[in-house]
Image (cartoon, rainbow, N blue to C red):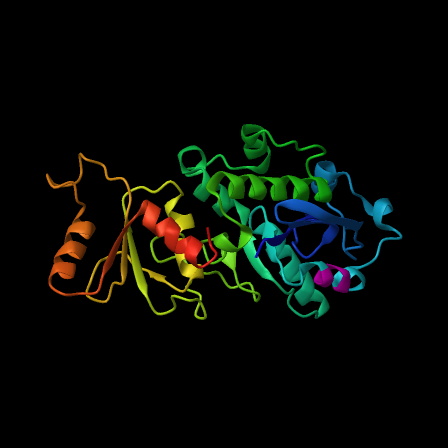
């Protein structure tokens, strides 16, 4: 999946269901192919604090459509795409607004781009400081008119594109990581080892894979790519393990043979007849290319 939709919403008050503006930007192959924005009549009160942030007041939305009137237009753009938002607020707001009006759940698989930022640039953003404005400034991405829905959606989408380019990934490779949600909005497992959800119809469905050492791509990205092929990412090596991917090791932590505990156990099991394949980083990337996931 190389198609994704970046979304941002603004609300009239502290209730997330009070959406008063929506911005959508559609990307295909990392390029913008469509943009859409609309003011929305939230049929709710406007709080002075919210108005001070985004500048949208009651007069602005007098002739604007309500959410049910733009629902199908949004669904059309969501079709067949990953829906990406910067943080959980936008997904939650749309979910609560849909529930308020008795609308069906918005179609699409959702991804929280804050988790993408932490996965793509762990040294810079893993422990905090990933506000959209700060991240855009650090990455050299223009963010004009902050808190205008279309501008924020475009900036968030451009951050996602930059993350894909930096890690040599596509939108599909990030699905199933911590922060992604299913169509119904339920949260997937947290971002850690085994966080990536295996693709049950993938070419390697049913296999188990273990990573040890540092790869050129972030660990979370490597796990997501393996999971997209159907591999289950596990933290320990056993007789049930099919692949062990060995990256660069910290020589101060490994034994005199240069092997990590995981690699050493895999080698021992392999010598005892277990059909474990031990791959270096280049061989793992070749495996991905073999199945079209380079």
Splitting the image into 4 quarters, where does residue 215 fall? top left
Q: Residue 237 location, x and y as percent?
A: 21, 58
What is the magenta segment's predominant secondary structure? helix
Q: Is residue 45 above or below residue 241?
A: above
**Relative image position of residue 82 (x, y in whole percent):** 59, 57
In this rendering, is residue 210 above or below 139?
Answer: below
- Residue 203: percent from the left, percent from the top? 42, 67
Residue at image coords 19%, 35%: 251
| Rendered-image quadrant of the N terminus | bottom right
Return the residue nearer the eye: 191 or 41.
191
Range of magenta residues: 72-76
Using the image, determine if residue 242 lies above or below residue 220.
below
Question: Is residue 220 in the magenta section?
Answer: no
Residue at the right extreme?
A: 63
Residue drawn 54% across the image and 47% down it: 113
Q: Inspect this view and state whether residue 99 appears.
A: yes
């Amino acid at each position: 999946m190389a198609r994704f939709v970046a979304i941002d919403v603004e609300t009239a008050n502290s209730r997330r269901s009070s959406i008063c503006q929506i911005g959508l930007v559609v990307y295909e192959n990392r390029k913008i192919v469509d943009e859409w924005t609309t003011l929305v009549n939230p049929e709710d009160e406007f709080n002075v604090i919210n108005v001070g942030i985004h500048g949208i007041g009651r007069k602005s939305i007098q002739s604007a459509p309500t959410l049910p009137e733009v629902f199908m237009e949004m669904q059309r753009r969501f079709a067949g795409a990953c829906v990406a938002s910067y943080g959980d607020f936008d997904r939650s707001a749309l979910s609560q607004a849909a529930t308020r009006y008795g609308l069906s759940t918005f179609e699409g698989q959702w991804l929280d781009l804050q988790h993408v930022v932490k996965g793509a640039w762990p040294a810079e953003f893993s422990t905090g400081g990933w506000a959209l404005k700060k991240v855009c400034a650090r990455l050299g991405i223009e963010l004009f008119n902050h808190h205008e829905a279309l501008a924020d959606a475009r900036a968030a989408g451009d951050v996602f594109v930059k993350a894909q380019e930096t890690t040599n990934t596509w939108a599909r490779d990030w699905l199933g990581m911590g922060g992604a949600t299913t169509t119904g909005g339920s949260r997937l497992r947290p971002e850690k080892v085994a966080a990536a959800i295996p693709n049950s119809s993938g070419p390697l469905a049913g296999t188990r894979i273990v990573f040890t050492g540092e790869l050129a791509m972030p660990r979370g990205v490597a796990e997501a790519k393996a999971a997209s092929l159907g591999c289950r990412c596990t933290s320990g090596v056993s007789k049930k393990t099919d692949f062990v991917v060995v990256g660069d090791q910290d020589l101060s932590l490994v034994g005199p043979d240069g092997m990590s505990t995981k690699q050493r156990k895999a080698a021992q099991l392999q010598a005892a007849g277990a059909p474990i394949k031990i791959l270096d980083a280049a061989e793992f990337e070749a495996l991905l290319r073999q199945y079209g996931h380079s």
